[in-house]
Amino acid sequence: MPANTPWHVGDRDDPGKDPGIAAEDESPGEVLAGIVSEAALSRDGWAFAGWRGGRWGQARVCWVRAERALHVVGASEMASGLRELIARGGAPGWQLRPVPVGRTPLRELAEPLLTASRSNRYYNLLDRNCFSTVEEVAATPSECLGSLYQAGPKMVTAVHEVLRLIGRDPLRVVNPAAGGSVADRRALIMRHMPGELQHRYGEFSDWLARSSMPEGALAAIAVSLSGEPVPTADPIVCLLLDTAGETELVRFYRSSHRPAAAAGGDGAPAGL
């Protein structure tokens, strides 16, 4: 297999082992283009993106064809770059699968999984496959979780049991929409929201689009949300996040708030 070819669920070799560091690291944009091409030609599966010792680090991406969704796993620059590109529409016809709010370290699952399975195997498998948070695990569809190399139904059952015990059940809609319509339904919701609210309610919108509610109801909810005032970004919050090196958190914070320069003297948005 060529060095830059993404690994996917059909590979017989252990995908947990790096095939090597490429002579030239591919950027998140180049990697995403390859993953989209792979996803268009194969069933649901996984791909490694980047290399552990490379410039961008490594991530894993799962594609869910029925939802036309890409699920990005990892805490690397590659993972952050892929999420940002997909959220901005960089993978036409695909959307970013929502992940519950929070950054609970994956290690919080180590002891509960050991208790549930009497082995560290399941935790080590998640860690080896780039999972970095409990929320990423909770957002992974059962069929994708079970298709990880050396996983299977017993692991899925154990992981779901542990997630329930710690109160991290994956969010589900009661009456889901047809998979192929989810992307169009999300686009309808986004058309009624300004940019800051698209980021603030991105996860909610993703799950809302998965429901089978009539499109008129979706639009009515989006219009109602669009009327909410957007708070101004606090420079102190931005400074603290920047100082801590939390680039992904500060990017999200700024994207979901009005810029400080847009505020009037009394703290209200200019022009109001």
Image (spheres, rainbow, N blue to C red):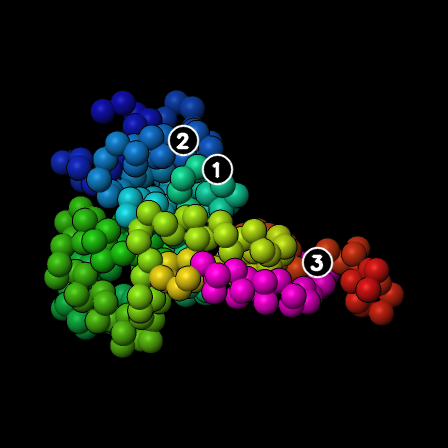
- In this view, the residue farthest toward the right is 265
| Residue located beneath label 3 in the image | 258
Query: Which portion, as a residue range, is magenta?
Result: 215-241
Identify the residue at image location x=82%, y=64%. Answer: 272
- What SS does tag 3 mark? loop
Q: Secondary structure at mark 1?
A: loop
Question: Where does the image place residue 211, in percent across and percent down from the top left?
Answer: 37, 62
Residue 231 within the segment the image draws in magenta = yes
Q: Inspect the image, locate mark 1, and give the three-letter code of the amino acid beneath it.
A: Gly
Q: Quadrant of residue 193?
A: bottom right
The residue under the point 27% across, 66% down is 110
Q: Residue at x 42, y 24 (%)?
A: 24
Question: Residue 74 in the image: x percent, y percent?
Answer: 39, 50
Q: Label 2, on which residue?
A: 33
Front residue of this view, candidates 151 and 144: 144
Is 55 situated left or right of 211 in this image? right
Task: Tell me the chief SS of the magenta region.
Answer: helix
- Work out whether residue 139 or residue 271 is closer to the camera in this orientation and state it: 271
The residue lying at 54 percent from left, 64 percent from top is 220
**Amino acid identity at mark 3:** Arg
For disc 1, the marked residue is: 90
Give above or below for 89 relative to 112.
Answer: above
Q: Would residue 170 be visible to someone looking at this image?
A: no
Indicate the quadrant where residue 65 lies. Answer: top left
In the rendered view, tell whether residue 197 sits above or below residue 44: below
Q: Quadrant of residue 4?
A: top left
